[in-house]
Image (spheres, coloured by chain):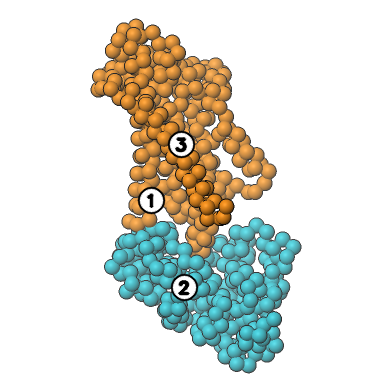
Chain colours: A orange, B cyan
Amino acid sequence: MNAKKWDKVATAVLTGIAGLIVLLLACLLGYILVRGLPHVTWQFLTKPAQTFTKGGGIGVQLFNSFYLLILAMVISIPLSIGAGIYLAEYAPKNWVTNVVRTAIEVLSSLPSVVVGLFGFLVFVIQFKLGFSILAGALVLTVFNLPLLTRNVEDALKSIHFTQREAGLALGLSRYETVKHVVIPEALPNIITGMILGAGRVFGEAAALIYTAGQSAPSLDFTNWNPMYIASPLNPMRPAETLAVHIWKINSEGIMPDATAVSAGASAVLIIAVLLFNWLARVIGKRVYRKMTAA
Amino acid sequence: MANKIIESADVHLFYGKNEALKGINMDFVENEITALIGPSGCGKSTYLRCLNRMNDLIDSAKVTGKFLLNGQDIYAPEMDTVKLRKEVGMVFQQPNPFPFSIYDNVIYGLRLSGIKDHRVLDEAVESSLKQAAVWDDVKDKLHESALSLSGGQQQRVCIARVLAVKPQVILMDEPTSALDPISSAKIENMLLELRQQYTIIMVTHNMHQASRISDKTAFFLQGELIEYAPTKKIFLNPTEKETEDYISGRFG
C-alpha cells in the first residue's frame, strides 16, 4: 500500500476512535440525564432528605455542596496562587524546587480515598475538628491544591519571556512585572483552571466521607448565625454533600424511592459540573477580552 | 566637544566559561545614533544588554569592566536597576506590546510611577505616539487592543511606550528586522527625528540601515570590537581588513 492509502486508513481509524469516545460519553450523560431529570422538581431541589419515607429532596445536600465548595476555594485559591507565582517566577533551579515540584505531582495523583483518610486522621482526629464542614474544606484543599498550583504555574509560564523583558526594560521591578504584566495576562487561564477545579471538588465524594461526614442534620434556614448549631453557615457541623448522598443512598438507602432520589441527585450533580465547565469557558473568554482591550 | 553620555571600558562578559565579550572599550556621545553591526553571535546584542543590565536576568552571565552613565557607575551596588532602566530604555527585536489597549500600553511606565492625572497621561500618550510616528494610525482606536495592530504599528507603539518614560538613552535590538520595508522606513525616519532629544544605540543586521541613519558605526566580531568610527569612514574607508570584508559581503 502507498502513503496516500495509509493516510486514508489512519484518518479513518483515528476518526473512529474519537467517535467511539464521544459516543460513550454521550451515552453515559444521556442515561443519567434521561433517568434523573424527570425527578428533578423545585420540591426535590429544596426539600430535606427523608430516611424512611418517600418524597425526600436534596435541598440540604445541595446547600452543603456549595458551602463546602466555597470554603474550600477560599482556602485553596490564595495558597495556590502564591505557590504558583513562586514556582513560576521566583524559584531558583535547584534540587529543593525540584523536590517541591515532584511532591506536587505525586500529591495530584493521590487517590482521593487516601487523601480522605489522611484528612480523617489529621483534621478530624488530631485537630479535633470532628466530622465537620471545616475538616471537609481542608481535605478538599489538600486534594485540590496541587492541581491548582500546577495550573497557576503553567498559566504564568505560558506568558512569553519577551513580555517580562518588556516590563523590566520599562523600569518595572520584578514584582511589579509579575503583578502588572504577567498575572493580568495569565488571569483568564488562571480563572478557567480555578473553575474547573471547583467542578472537580463539587463532584468529590470519597475524600469527604470520613471528613465532612455522611449525615445531614436538618438545618434552620432562618438562623444564619454561624455559631448556632443548626445554622446553615456553622462550619463545625457535619455536612453530607450531594456526591456523598448519592453514594450513601446506593449503598445503604432504605427509603422506598431510593432509586429515584439517586437518579435525580446524579442528574443535578452532572448538570452542576457541566455548568462549571461552561462557566469556565465563558468567564475565561470574557476576562481575556476585557484584559486585552479596554 | 560633545558630551559623553555613556562610557564603557575593558568590558568582559562570560556565559559560564564562554567569553562572549573580550574587552570592549566604547563611549557614546549625546544625541547621536550609533549602529552596532557584525555577524550573528559576535556579541553586539550582548554588549547592548549590558548597558541597561538586562544581562542580570541571565544567571550564568558575569560582567566585568567599567560602565558609566553620566559619570555614574551603572554596575555599582547602590545603582537601582529600576531607575537605570527608566534612563536607558529598550526596544526589542520582536514587537512586544502588552495585551492591553494602545493607551494603556503607552502610559504603562507613567502610571506605575504614580501619575494619575488624566490630562498629563492623555498628553503623554499623544506626544509619545506622535514622536513614534504612529499617532495618525491609532488616534481613533486608542482603547482597542495593541495586539490588533500590524507588526510595524506594534513596534512603533512599543517605541512610544519607551518614549513616554522620557529616557536619556534608547537601546534598540534589531528594531526593524521583523518588519516590512515600509514600516522599517517609517521607523528609520522617526529615529532621525528622535536623535535631537535622545541618544540611540541600535543593533542592526541591515548594513543599509546602519549607513543611512547612524552617526557612528561599531563593527563587532567574535566578542571583540574591531572598529568604531564615524559611519562614513566605516563604510567608505575602513581601517581594518575584517571590517572591509564584512561590509562588502566578502566575509568568510
Are discs 3 and 2 less than 8 Å apart at CB?
A: no
Query: Relative to A200, does residue B49 appear above or below in the rendering?
Result: below
Chain letter of the residue beneath label 2 in the structure image: B
- Disc 2 to disc 1, how far (Cα)? 27 Å
Choose mark 2 or mark 1, whichever is in front: 2
Q: According to the image, label 1 marks what residue?
A: A288
Amino acid type at circle 2 is Leu
Mark drawn on residue A171: none
Q: Are the residues under badges 3 and 1 in a single subunit?
A: yes
Q: Residue at x 43, y 68 (%)?
A: B151
Residue at the far left: name it. A42
Q: Residue at x 51, y 73 (%)?
A: B177
Q: According to the image, label 3 marks what residue?
A: A21
Mark drawn on residue B179: 2
The image position of residue B36, as x and y in percent, is 59, 78
Residue at the far front: name it. A1
